[in-house]
Amino acid sequence: MDETRWDLMTRILHWGLALTISAQLISGLLVPDPQTRAFFYFHEWDGLAASTVIFVVWLWIYSIQDFGTLFPWNRAGMQAVGADIRGLFRGTLPSGGPNHIGLASFWHGLGILAVTGMAITGVWIFFVIPGGHGASSSSTDFHEYMQVSWLHKMISYFVWAYLIGHISFAILHQKKGAPIFRGIFYR
C-alpha cells in the first residue's frame, strides 16, 4: 500500500471535515454582523453537521484504534515529534502518512481536539442562545451564553492556525514530491 494513501472512510471523513469546518470558519466571520443573519442560521446548522462529522471521526478513530498515532503523548511518541521538529530546523519536512507517528500525526491530533472543542461549545451555544432563538428557547442566561461564546471564539483562533498550518504543510509536501493530495482526496 502507498505510504501516503489513506483508507476510504478516512478520506470521506476528511472531505466532511474540510467542507463543514471551512464553511464554519468563513461563516463565523460574518455571524457578529446583524446584517448577515442568514449566515448565522447557516453557521448554526452547518455547525450541527460539522459536529456530527466530528462525532463520526471519533467513532472511526476508536474503531481503527488510531489513538496512539494521533495522540503520541508517550515517551517514544514525543521523541518522534521532537526528532521531526529538529528535522524542520535542518530543512527536512517530517514524514507523513496514515501510520506515521511524529509531528504530522501530533498536529492532526491537536486539530481533532480543537474542532471537537469547537463542536462541543457550538452545540452548547445552540442550546442556550437567549431570547427564544436557541434549541431550549426558554433560556435567559446571557452570562452562560457569553462565557461559552467567548470560549468558542478563543478555540476558533487555534482552529484557524491549525487549518492554515495544515494546508501550508500539505502544499509543501506536495511540492517536495509526496503525493499528499492524491493520497487523501483521490483513489
Image (cartoon, rainbow, N blue to C red):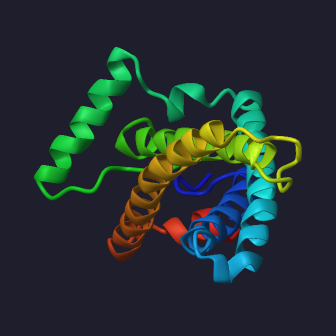
Q: Check the image and report above or below for 49 versus 85.
A: below
Residue placed furthest toward the left: 90
Q: Residue 187: horizontal and vertical position, in percent?
A: 71, 68
Residue placed furthest toward the top: 75
Give left or right: position of 1 versus 156.
right
Give left or right: position of 55 versus 32.
right
Give left or right: position of 93 versus 162.
left
User: Is 145 in front, or is 108?
Assistant: 145
Q: Residue 73: horizontal and vertical position, in percent?
A: 41, 22
Q: Can residue 98 be seen in the rendering of this structure?
A: no
- Residue 178, by quadrant, is bottom left
The residue sitting at 68% across, 69% down in the picture is 19
Q: Check the image and report above or below for 59 versus 28.
A: above
User: Is 128 in front, or is 101?
Assistant: 128
The residue sitting at 26% across, 42% down in the picture is 84
Q: Residue 150: horizontal and vertical position, in percent?
A: 51, 46
How many numbered tags mark residues here? 0
Give left or right: position of 180 versus 6.
left
User: Is 187 in front, or is 43?
Assistant: 43
Q: Check the image and report above or below for 158 versus 28.
A: above
The residue sitting at 42% across, 55% down in the picture is 157
Q: Residue 87: horizontal and vertical position, in percent?
A: 18, 47
